[in-house]
Image (cartoon, coloured by chain):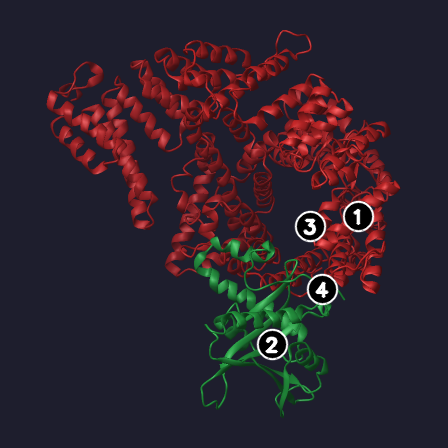
């Protein structure tokens, strides 16, 4: 299948459709931020609901809206429609003596109809790109990128390992509560 | 007493000291320094308590203070303001009595009236002042503004002439006088005045240079020239002169596009079609390829249309052109196709123009292969791109002959029945079905070159769903739109369409929930927010609606107040509809009146432009404004509000008991003391209305039509939210007032005359009723409104207790039979029955009207009447939730349960989501 030209991010000057919410912001400046967050909450929710067997609680979306960094959490737009989303965060590596941190991909999803067009790759790439740009700046404490994948999700493991050079790490048992199998692997890639 | 005091008008001026004080009073008033002005005035009055001019000035100052107090927000202050205003009027009147021969007193008296928008009285006072001081420029100027505002055109002309004679050196006065002559219909003389003005100027002065003002003035003169008759027999002498004049002014004009468009129009009117084509191409080169009026003109030039057609095409709006105005012959079509589609045609010259591509499709014969290819290409492109408006865009191809114009004009098919039979719709359905099959199997269009993006299938489904919507196939539409939502749940458009389908299909509640879910995806989109609000209102959920609309209003103040201040008519109309459906007629009237007030404000708003436009020499735009304001009451939103006001007043006139349920809940919310007070108030008002409360109301309305609205504007809505005052008026008088406005300003609408009829017969004015019937007949002789009213009229003639004047009786008995084609009532109804039976498409309201007539006149049995409706199987025109509700009501009243059951069975097939029937 061919590659689709997708646009990323919260804001992208090339894509007027996507700019729309921001163009409207003159209406009520005070409410804008709050509204923009709520709106993105809903969009993200729709995408995640369509993509994942796991239902995230409202608190997840509220947190996303509050803390989201547009470089780490972004939508993929195709001709003005939000069709995919990736949410990552920077978190400390547990028990690390040097206090280093890692990039953790919390969710990544593309609506079924738009898969196999390289959109997921582009989203991961855009995160990697951000790391490359900021590795001596904001992300100077980050050593690795990691993600949880369900043990049965062979496609996903292939995706991370073959395309991005992730390595299979330890098995986490009973990571998921309501889906079967409940176990997952940790996939990680050393970034430096 | 008054003889003791100095009075200016009687030749006894104030002593020097007081004279200075008086000058200060005037100065302070003009600079709005009211307190100081008041102090000075009181100082004079201390010595001369009866000095007329000072009393007047004091009154004027008090009035000024009152206005600023009323503008404030506190209730107490407002009451004080009202008191002050009364006192002000007293003072001015007393001053005037003291010194009737002072022009100052009369001027002040005029200003006072003007400040309460009582323009007719103000003009009278100014005239009186001018009788004393003929050359007072200030008063003359003030008066001329009032005269043009009130459209006292002859008076306006006289005043402007007097001003010009007094001050012939001022440009503004020349222009104003020319305009005053122009609005009186004498363009020729207006040109003469402008020429005289140019004659007073020196060679090479700024007026002859190239700048905005000289350009506008030159174009205004040109417009005047084109309106003159000229000496030629064909009446085109003016246009000829105007065309020549354009060349003279070319190097002064800065509005090149306006200049070219004027040239184009004149060339067409004069039949200089080759020249016109050249002008069109200059316009295209200037980048006007997307403007449909230029294309309309181009088509007129190509087909050598007559002057009337050219002028009609010039006025068309939106994407209208000659080909959407009237049917064209094969020969004409070929000429147009050659100009647009061929190798040397426009689409080759301007390959990037969407307008030209789209117009080309409209010209192509819809039965040809070429049309199919073109539309296929167009749809593929738009679907690949993902253009949500494609459905609406394509629906402008559903052109059909307008039955009311006997085939000389085109109209768009709108009724599902007509759309379904339309060849373009049939073609589109086939086309899109093929897209969907092909896209879902191998993700490419049937013609097959190249892979499409995944969204192509999505937009194909969406378009197919809209095509279903157009022909009222709601269930099928929903199936497809659900697929869209599953495919891409993040797009707002899909939720909107789904809500529309649900609403039309009968489930307004679910529609509201669906569109609200869509709204949740984009909180910044005012459009979807408004649509949500509207759907909530239609679903009767005014609280939800208020919450949604409040997301886009300012935070201070109530949303309702903000929407009123922003003149948000659509919201008020929808809310008023909701209240009316709930039977809260007072509150509903209040909301409709709010819309009426907006229009009064629009009318009031022109006041500032009278002096401004002439000073800025935007004469052409100013003339447009004057014309717009003259037609203001014919605009759709005003019409909707006025119609509903008339209907409500007629309804409560016919059903006085309908109000009881309305008033009760209002009382129940109050404390016992409040309740008593309110009831007393209501009783008092009712009594007042009986005696002549309505008289004072009509008076304030005849004066410029705006009463006290403007000044108390920020509060107008709070004073009487439940509309008790409106319900205390005389219902028929109010209905009459608005029906008359509708008849005058929307004379081409059947419903205007239907209402005029309803009001007239209730007032016992049979002749006026008859006239309305004839007006309706001249608009649409087959409409159900006319039919039911002819029946009603004939029954009223029989049953009335008193006769009209002899002459009226003669006219009625001579003219009325013409409405029934010279037949008796029974024959008339029977011929209508025949017509309904022979034409399966006869609209549902007509069927209901005929069925009702059968029952009321005893022209057949109840089953006969039911069959008129049921035989249609609802495969007729005008089948919607409202018309079905009315039919059902009738059927339930005569047909009992079996008839009702049959009709409901039909309803379910048409409205799959029907809930509350």
Pointer 3 with pointer 1, Cβ within 8 A: no
Q: Which mark is residue B216?
A: none
**Residue B761 appears at what percent x and percent y?**
64, 34
The answer as to whether the residues below labels 2 and 1 share one chain is no
Q: Which image quadrant for residue B434?
A: bottom right
Chain letter of mark 2 equals A
Disc 4 crowd rating (10 Å Cα; few below 14, some 14-19, many 20+) is few
Residue where numbered disc 1 is placed: B377
Chain letter of mark 3 equals B
Position of the N terminus of chain B, as image quadrant, is top left
Q: What residue is at 81 percent from the left and 44 percent from the top? A: B374
Residue where numbered disc 2 is placed: A107
**Distance from the alpha carbon under mark 4 to that under mark 2:** 22 Å
Pointer 2 with pointer 1, Cβ within 8 A: no
Q: Is residue B796 above or below residue B431?
A: above
* B785 sits to left or right of B244: right
Q: Earlier in the sequence, mark 3 or mark 1?
A: 1
Q: Which image quadrant for residue B164?
A: top left
Q: Earlier in the sequence, mark 4 or mark 2?
A: 4
Pointer 3 with pointer 2, Cβ within 8 A: no
Position of the C terminus of chain B, as image quadrant, is bottom right
Q: Colour of chain B?
A: red
Pick the residue in front: B794 or B13. Answer: B13
Rendered green, the chain in question is A
**Distance from the alpha carbon under mark 4 to that under mark 1:** 24 Å
Where disc 1 sits, the SS reads: helix
The answer as to whether the residues below labels 4 and 2 share one chain is yes
Q: Which image quadrant for residue B230?
A: top right
Pick the residue in front: B683 or B123. Answer: B123
Where disc 4 sits, the SS reads: loop
């Amino acid at each position: 299948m061919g590659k689709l030209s997708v646009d990323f991010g919260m804001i992208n000057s090339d894509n007027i459709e996507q700019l729309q919410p921001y163009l409207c912001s003159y209406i009520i400046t005070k409410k804008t931020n709050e509204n923009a967050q709520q709106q993105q909450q809903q969009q993200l929710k729709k995408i995640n609901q369509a993509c994942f067997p796991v239902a995230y609680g409202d608190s997840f979306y509220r947190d996303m809206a509050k803390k989201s960094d547009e470089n780490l959490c972004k939508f993929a737009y195709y001709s003005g429609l939000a069709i995919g989303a990736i949410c990552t965060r920077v978190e400390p590596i547990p028990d690390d003596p040097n206090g280093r941190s890692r990039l953790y991909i919390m969710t990544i999803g593309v609506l079924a109809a738009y898969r196999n067009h390289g959109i997921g790759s582009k989203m991961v790439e855009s995160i990697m790109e951000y790391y490359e740009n900021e590795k001596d700046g904001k992300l100077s404490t980050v050593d690795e990128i990691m993600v949880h994948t369900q043990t049965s999700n062979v496609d996903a493991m292939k995706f991370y390992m073959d395309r991005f050079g992730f390595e299979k790490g330890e098995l986490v048992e009973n990571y998921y509560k309501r889906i079967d199998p409940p176990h997952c692997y940790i996939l990680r890639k050393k970034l430096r | 007493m008054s003889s003791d005091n100095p009075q200016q008008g009687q030749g006894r001026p104030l002593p020097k000291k007081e004279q200075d004080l008086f000058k200060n009073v005037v100065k302070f008033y003009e600079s709005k320094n009211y307190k100081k002005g008041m102090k000075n005035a009181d100082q004079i009055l201390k010595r001369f308590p009866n000095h007329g001019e000072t009393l007047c000035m004091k009154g004027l100052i008090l009035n000024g203070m009152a206005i600023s107090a009323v503008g404030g927000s506190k209730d107490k202050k407002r009451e004080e303001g009202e008191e002050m205003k009364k006192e002000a009027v007293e003072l001015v009147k007393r001053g005037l009595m003291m010194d009737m021969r002072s022009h100052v007193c009369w001027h002040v008296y005029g200003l006072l009236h003007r400040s309460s928008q009582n323009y007719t009285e103000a003009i009278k006072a100014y005239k009186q002042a001018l009788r004393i001081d003929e050359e007072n420029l200030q008063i003359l100027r003030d008066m001329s503004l009032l005269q043009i505002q009130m459209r006292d055109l002859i008076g306006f002309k006289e005043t402007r002439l007097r001003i010009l004679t007094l001050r012939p050196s001022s440009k503004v006065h020349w222009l104003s006088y020319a305009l005053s002559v122009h609005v009186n219909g004498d363009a020729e003389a207006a040109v003469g005045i402008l020429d005289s003005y140019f004659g007073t100027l020196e060679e090479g002065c700024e007026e002859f240079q190239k700048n905005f003002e000289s350009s506008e003035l030159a174009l205004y003169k040109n417009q005047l020239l084109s309106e003159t008759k000229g000496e030629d027999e064909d009446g085109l002498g003016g246009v000829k002169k105007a065309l020549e004049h354009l060349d003279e002014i070319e190097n002064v004009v800065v509005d090149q596009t306006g200049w070219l468009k004027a040239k184009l129009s004149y060339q067409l009117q004069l039949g200089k079609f080759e020249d016109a084509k050249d002008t069109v191409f200059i316009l295209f080169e200037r980048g006007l390829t997307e403007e449909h009026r230029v294309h309309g003109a181009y088509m007129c030039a190509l087909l050598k249309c007559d002057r009337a057609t050219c002028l009609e095409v010039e006025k068309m709006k939106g994407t209208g052109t000659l080909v959407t105005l009237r049917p064209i012959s094969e020969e004409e079509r070929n000429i147009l196709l050659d100009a647009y589609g061929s190798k040397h045609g426009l689409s080759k010259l301007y390959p990037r123009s969407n307008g030209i591509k789209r117009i080309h499709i409209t010209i192509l014969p819809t039965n040809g292969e070429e049309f199919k290819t073109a539309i296929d290409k167009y749809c593929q492109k738009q679907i690949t791109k993902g253009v949500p408006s494609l459905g609406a865009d394509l629906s402008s191809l559903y052109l059909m002959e307008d039955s009311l114009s006997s085939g000389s004009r085109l109209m768009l098919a709108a009724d599902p029945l007509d759309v379904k039979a339309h060849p373009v719709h049939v073609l589109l359905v086939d086309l899109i079905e093929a897209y969907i099959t092909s896209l879902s199997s191998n993700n490419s269009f049937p013609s097959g070159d190249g892979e499409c993006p995944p969204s192509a299938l999505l937009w194909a489904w969406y378009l197919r769903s809209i095509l279903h919507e157009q022909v009222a196939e709601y269930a099928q539409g929903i199936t497809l739109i659900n697929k869209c939502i599953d495919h891409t749940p993040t797009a707002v458009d899909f939720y909107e369409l789904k809500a529309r389908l649900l609403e039309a299909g009968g489930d307004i509640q679910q529609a509201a929930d669906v569109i609200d879910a869509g709204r949740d995806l984009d909180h910044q989109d005012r459009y979807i927010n408004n649509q949500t609000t509207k759907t909530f209102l239609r679903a009767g959920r005014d609280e939800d609606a208020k919450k949604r609309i409040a997301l886009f209003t300012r935070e201070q103040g109530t949303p309702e107040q903000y929407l009123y201040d922003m003149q948000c008519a659509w919201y008020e109309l929808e809310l008023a509809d909701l209240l009316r459906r709930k039977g809260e007629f007072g509150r509903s009237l209040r909301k409709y009146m709010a819309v009426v007030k907006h229009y009064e404000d629009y009318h009031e708003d022109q006041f500032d432009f009278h002096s401004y436009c002439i000073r800025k020499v935007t004469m052409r735009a100013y003339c447009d404004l004057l014309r717009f304001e003259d037609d203001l009451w014919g605009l759709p939103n005003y019409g909707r509000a006025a119609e509903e006001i008339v209907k409500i007043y007629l309804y409560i006139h016919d059903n006085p008991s309908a109000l009881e349920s309305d008033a009760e809940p209002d009382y129940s919310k109050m404390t016992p003391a409040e309740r008593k007070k309110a009831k007393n108030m209501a009783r008092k008002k009712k009594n007042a209305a009986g005696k002549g409360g309505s008289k004072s109301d009509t008076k304030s309305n005849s004066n410029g039509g705006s009463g006290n609205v403007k000044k108390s504007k920020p509060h107008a809505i709070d004073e009487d939210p439940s509309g008790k005052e409106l319900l205390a008026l005389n219902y028929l008088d109010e209905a009459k007032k608005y029906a008359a406005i509708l008849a005058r300003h929307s004379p081409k609408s059947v419903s205007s005359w239907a209402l005029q009829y309803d009001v007239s017969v209730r007032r016992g004015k049979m002749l006026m009723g008859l006239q309305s019937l004839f007006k309706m007949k001249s608009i649409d002789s087959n409409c159900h409104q006319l039919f039911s009213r002819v029946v009603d009229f004939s029954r009223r003639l029989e049953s009335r207790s008193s006769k009209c004047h002899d002459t009226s009786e003669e006219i009625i008995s001579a003219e009325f039979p013409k409405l029934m084609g010279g037949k008796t009532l029974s024959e008339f109804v029977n011929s209508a029955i025949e017509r309904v039976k022979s034409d399966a498409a006869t609209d549902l309201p007509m069927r209901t009207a005929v069925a009702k007539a059968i029952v009321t006149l005893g022209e057949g049995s109840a089953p006969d009447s039911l069959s008129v409706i049921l035989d249609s199987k609802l495969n007729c025109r005008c089948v919607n939730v409202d018309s079905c509700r009315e039919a059902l009501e009738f059927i339930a009243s005569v047909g009992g349960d079996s008839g009702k059951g049959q009709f409901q069975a039909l309803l379910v097939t048409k409205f799959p989501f029907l809930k509350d029937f």
